[in-house]
């Protein structure tokens, strides 16, 4: 075992946090017990590039119980929790990363994980997968495949495959029902406001709040904003999603018009320059901006700096920009993923990541047991159903099943009403 973490003395506090989330991750604990008995990953090395926090460490421990050697690093320099990494290292995981890494250190840690010569990669944003294809091609023959956690990573990998640049199969875990219906919607929705309200202590009720993007993450953010009493405006480029947002009761308009009314703006698109250029010139004094997309490219900080005469760091995750005309605009968490990079960011609730990481662990097992051609694959519907059943059972919820007569009726096309 090797590691490169900030402070091993933090391990006891990290272990307490891991024990807490384990109590709220019953599906993953069920899978962990299965893995202890069957050891599906015996002799296998699994490398991960994920947000390093207690729930993710629990995923690493689950894979470890299945027999894997696990090496982990962070997918965002500001989302790592140093007590969690220390705890992971003390529990036998190979840990590399600390909060506040430079860009150079970030890639050094990615390479240190890859030095373990993984058979399987579990990625969040696809940085590790890209690094293998671009710079660590010495590992290509050994890698069986990868699992990708987030929407942004899936977009990048599908584009890569379309260009015939992808060289091993990837499970699009983000595209599974048990991931995007719950993690993206309920997880992002709650954790975004947990972080924003914890950092700013501002009231959401009564504010005009602009949500940029109405995918599953945007739906969750808009839903929680409305529930907190905000007047929600949605911006979109997809006509169907825009129509859905309107039918859900939100105002829909172009970004340039929306920013004029905004007290707060939250981007959740996965794309670049969502708020940029002259958008900042139309914002009201006091507007707060935050990003819940994976990369810090949605709010163009360079464009904001160009129209600002001064900048000031009010708190570790609140930056104040004073424009030439005297307005004060605020950017949270350096424009990075606010629900994890924010000072108070804890990421998605444990009950949500329970399902997402169950899908990750079972998808890694599927990769190992099935020889797949190069491509980006959706997880099996059967896996979604199995995880859903386990979650319902943990919640002590019983549901109905079809009778034999009902099954026959659905299969018989000519039976009358």
Image (cartoon, helix red, strand yellow):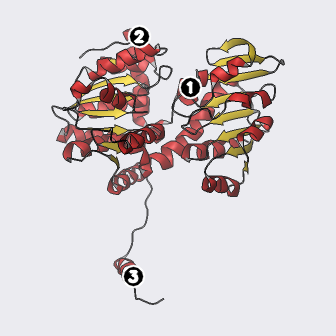
Question: Which of these two is toward me, 246 or 60?
Answer: 246
- Mark 2 or 1: in front is 1
Q: Residue 241, relative to residue 288: is it above or below?
A: below
Q: Residue at x 43, y 48 (%)?
A: 175
Q: Position of residue 238 (x, y in %)?
A: 60, 51
Q: Which residue is mark 1?
A: 336
Q: CA distance from mark 2 to mark 1?
A: 21 Å
Q: CA distance from mark 1 to mark 3?
A: 52 Å
What residue sits 47% from the left and 41% below the top? 151
Residue carrying label 2? 6
The structure residue drawn at horizontal position 73% and vertical position 17%, both measured from the top left corner, is 321
Q: Nearer the viewer, residue 32 or 144?
A: 144
- x and y percent of residue 214 in the render? 61, 47
User: As rendered, which of 212 and 281 lies closer to the eye?
Assistant: 281
Classify mark 1: helix, strand or loop. Answer: loop
Q: Quadrant of residue 318?
A: top right
For the residue carrying disc 1, how many other residues have a C-alpha within 10 Å: few (<14), some (14-19), or many (20+)? many
Quick check: 44 left or right of 111? left
> Pointer 3: what residue?
409
Q: Secondary structure at mark 2?
A: loop
Contact, CB < 8 Å: mark 1 with mark 3? no
Quarter of the image that includes the N terminus: top left
Residue ranking furthest to the right: 325
């Amino acid at each position: 075992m090797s590691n490169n973490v900030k402070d091993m003395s933090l391990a006891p506090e990290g272990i307490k946090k891991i024990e807490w989330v384990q109590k709220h991750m019953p599906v993953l604990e069920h899978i962990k017990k299965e893995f202890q008995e069957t050891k599906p990953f015996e002799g296998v090395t699994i490398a991960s590039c994920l947000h390093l926090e207690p729930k993710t460490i629990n995923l690493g421990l689950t894979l470890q119980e299945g027999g894997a050697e696990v090496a982990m690093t962070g997918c965002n320099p500001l989302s790592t929790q140093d007590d969690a990494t220390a705890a992971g290292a003390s529990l036998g995981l190979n840990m590399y990363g600390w909060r506040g890494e430079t860009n150079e250190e970030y890639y050094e840690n990615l390479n240190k994980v890859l030095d373990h010569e993984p058979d399987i990669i579990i990625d969040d944003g696809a940085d590790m997968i890209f690094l293998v294809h671009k710079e660590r091609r010495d590992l290509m023959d050994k890698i069986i495949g990868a699992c990708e956690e987030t929407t942004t990573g899936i977009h990048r990998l599908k584009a890569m495959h379309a260009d015939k640049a992808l060289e091993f199969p990837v499970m699009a875990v983000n595209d599974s029902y048990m991931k995007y219906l719950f993690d993206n919607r309920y997880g992002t929705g709650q954790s975004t406001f947990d972080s924003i309200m914890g950092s700013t202590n501002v009231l959401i009720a009564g504010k005009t709040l602009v949500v940029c993007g109405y995918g599953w993450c945007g739906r969750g953010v808009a839903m929680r904003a409305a529930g907190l009493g905000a007047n929600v405006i949605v911006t979109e480029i997809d006509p169907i999603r825009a129509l859905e947002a309107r039918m859900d009761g939100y105002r829909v308009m172009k970004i340039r018009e929306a920013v004029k009314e905004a007290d707060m703006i939250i981007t959740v698109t996965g794309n670049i320059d969502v708020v940029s250029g002259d958008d900042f010139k139309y914002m009201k004094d006091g507007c707060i901006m935050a990003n819940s997309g994976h990369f810090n490219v949605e709010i163009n900080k360079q464009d904001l700096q160009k129209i600002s005469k001064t900048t000031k760091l009010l708190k570790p995750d609140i930056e104040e920009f004073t424009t030439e005309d005297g307005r004060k605009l605020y950017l949270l968490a350096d424009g990075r993923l606010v629900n994890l990079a924010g000072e108070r960011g804890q990421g998605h609730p444990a009950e949500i990541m329970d399902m997402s990481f169950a899908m990750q662990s079972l998808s890694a097992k599927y990769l190992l047991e099935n020889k797949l051609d190069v491509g980006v694959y959706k997880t099996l519907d059967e896996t979604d159903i199995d995880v859903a059943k386990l979650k319902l059972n943990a919640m002590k919820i019983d549901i109905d099943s079809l009778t034999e007569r009902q099954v026959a009726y659905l299969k018989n096309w000519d039976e009358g009403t």
